[in-house]
Amino acid sequence: MLRKIKNNKIVLLQFVLMLVLTTMPVWLYAQTPGFEEDETDVPFDGGLSLVIAAGVGYGLHKVRQSRARRQADDVSQADK
């Protein structure tokens, strides 16, 4: 039962994350309508959110890798 609740929370978190990431470009326009016609709208983001997301993903990967390495070291020391 606990596993099912945990899986539902993960699915909900993934859904909310995808919803936020897909609607984020709409929120991040640097200029609002109402400027003169000769000016073009420029998005504020420019891919920076992708770079940040990649950095967060890489950081999580390194943290998990470090924990796994530390756990393997603890197990090998316990065997001695």
Image (cartoon, helix red, strand yellow):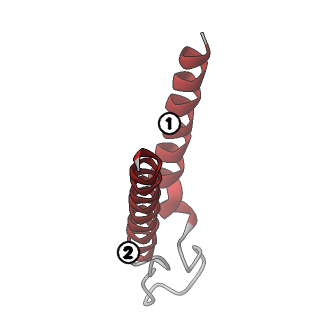
**Residue extending farthest top:** 1
- Seen in the picture, residue 78 relative to 14 is either above or below; the reply is below
Residue found at x 57% / y 73%: 33
Q: Residues within 10 Å of mark 1 (few under 14, many from 20)?
A: few
Q: Amino acid at mark 2?
A: Gly
Q: Which residue is mark 2?
A: 47
Residue 12 vertical placement versus 77 (above, below): above
Between residues 58 and 15, which one lies in front from this camera angle? 58
Q: Secondary structure at mark 1?
A: helix
How far apart are labels 2 and 1 at the CA level? Answer: 21 Å
**Vertical arrangement, residue 41 with respect to residue 9, above or below:** below
Give the residue displayed 41% in from the left and 45% down from the top.
79
Instruction: Give the left or right position of residue 27, taking residue 22 as reference.
Output: right
Q: Nearer the viewer, residue 73 or 63?
A: 73
- The residue under the point 51% across, 44% down is 19
The reply, left or right, for residue 67 in relation to residue 35 is left
Along the line of sight, which residue is nearer the eye, 14 or 75? 75
N-terminal of the two: label 2 or label 1? 1
Locate residue 71, reporting x and y percent. Answer: 46, 51
The disc placed on residue 15 is 1
| Crowdedness near tag 2: few (<14), some (14–19) or many (≥20) residues, C-alpha within 10 Å | few
Image x and y of residue 18, in percent: 46, 45
What label does residue 34 carry, if any? Answer: none
Residue 26 percent location from the top left of the image: 51, 61
